Amino acid sequence: MIVPVILAGGSGTRLWPLSRDLHPKQFFSLWDRRSLLQNTVGRVAGLADVGAPMVLCNETHRFMVAEQLRAMDVEASAIVLEPVGRNTAPAIAAAAHWCAAEGTDCLLLVLPSDHFIRDVPGFHAAVQAACGPAQDGYLISFGIVPHSPETGYGYIRKGEPIAGSSGVEAVVVDRFVEKPDLETAKRYVSSGRYCWNSGMFLFRASRLLEEMQRHAPAIALAAGDAVSAGRSDLDFFRLDAEAFGACPSDSIDYAVMEKTDRAAMLMLDVGWDDVGSWDALWQVGEKNGDRNILQGDVLVLDVRDSYLHATSRLLAAVGLERHVVVETADAVMIAPRDRTQEVKRLVERLKERNRPEARVHRRRYRPWGVLEKVLEDDRFHVNRLTLRPGAGIAQQKHFHRSEHWIVVSGEARVTRDRQESVLGAGESVFIPAGAVHRIRNPGKEPLEVIEVQVGGLLDETDTVRL
């Protein structure tokens, strides 16, 4: 059986201001109604002999993962929470150890959550073709047939065909090479002997652990300890923080694939892109007659070969060519398309200045739904709360602020100290400082509430959850 292992822990800083630390790109819809994560999950659904996917993510993203899977009516075999980021080798080792703890030696199909693949049937055929060599003990890397000399990818040099793999484009890996300069990349592509390293893999769980114990024993040991000392928490599995935190940080390429003598590659030509920049998103998206991609409330005049994305207001542009403009509620980013890789440097500067725009959106996901910051001042905050049907905010109190809840739509069941009331649209309730309170949505439709907070301390340090 194939178990898809979906790595959803990245930050996607080159797609700022849409992608941020606490809401990275894999959770956004960038070219259709599904997010990148949902597209990845949907892409594996048609594979033969495929099991429920396993998703590894940062614990701060767990509710977004759970909600997006729920929206697809997909039940994961596990949502594994990483207490800290330790790169791909520890994450994949934890997945293999988790399967071993469940008593299964399945094929792990490792997939980043933020890739684009145009030819899904071709992808399925390649995965099925790779199953034979993977069952025979090879560690399969999927190499992308290059159509241009890209400098942003690592490359894999093809070796000899795998013995007995007649009709299958599987070859022994001759060597992995780092991201090259442009002239070197041109030589690689013209030689026909190199593929881009996609970061997608297929191998048996037991074989991966054998090779990791041989080449990266510290990672294998720490990841195993993190699983054995981990615990289930609602719909999630929490890796033990101390054990996983002690794990060396390394990629699966460096830790295993470059060292093993059982690395093989199956070549893919399926319209793949890692969507690593705004220009990459323009490349894969559907364009209009002026070769523009326009998303949201966008009005243009004499604009060509550009990507314009608005999320909260009208975005108007005149006379642009080969540019990217992205608007969110709290930031606007403008760059030539050929310089969008440098957006990562902008994010680094924002973090140096401790700017919140590098980490969070005004729209923030919670276990119960969504909190959207509408207005903030030193003495008051205005938030819009959207509670899912059946969900509720934990019972709590505040010492330094009062709150006023106004129901916009739906039905709210509010507890204030020992008094409970039911509010409908247009009704409100005042929560004085010190009162124990909570709000729940007992209905079958989302509950929309405007929350006004007033006081001298308006952050999480003044929240006592009961």
Image (cartoon, helix red, strand yellow):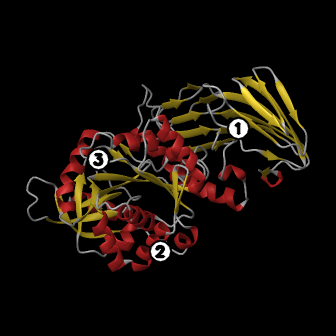
Name the kind of residue labelled 2 in the image: Ala
Residue at (42, 67) in percent of width and height? 89
Disc nearer the start of the sequence (3/1): 3
Name the spot of residue 455 as percent of width and height, x first: 91, 44
Front-lying residue, 243 or 16: 243
Residue 152: image location, x then y, percent: 41, 58
Q: Earlier in the sequence, mark 1 or mark 2?
A: 2
Q: Which residue is mark 1?
A: 372
The reply to whether discs 1 and 2 touch (Cβ–Cβ < 8 Å) is: no
Disc 3 target residue: 50
Q: CA distance from mark 1 to mark 2?
A: 38 Å
Q: Tell me where residue 32 sits by quadrant.
A: top left
Label 1 is placed on what type of residue?
Glu
Return the residue nearer the eye: 124 or 322: 124
Whichever of labels 3 and 2 marks the residue nearer the N terminus, that label is: 3
Q: Which residue is mark 2?
A: 222
For mark 1, does the 10 Å Cα neighbourhood hold few (<14), some (14 to 19), or many (20 or more) residues? some
Using residue 76 as the reference point, say whether residue 335 is left or right of it: right
Secondary element under disc 3, as helix, strand or loop, is: loop
User: Relative to residue 359, is residue 418 depicted above or below?
Assistant: above
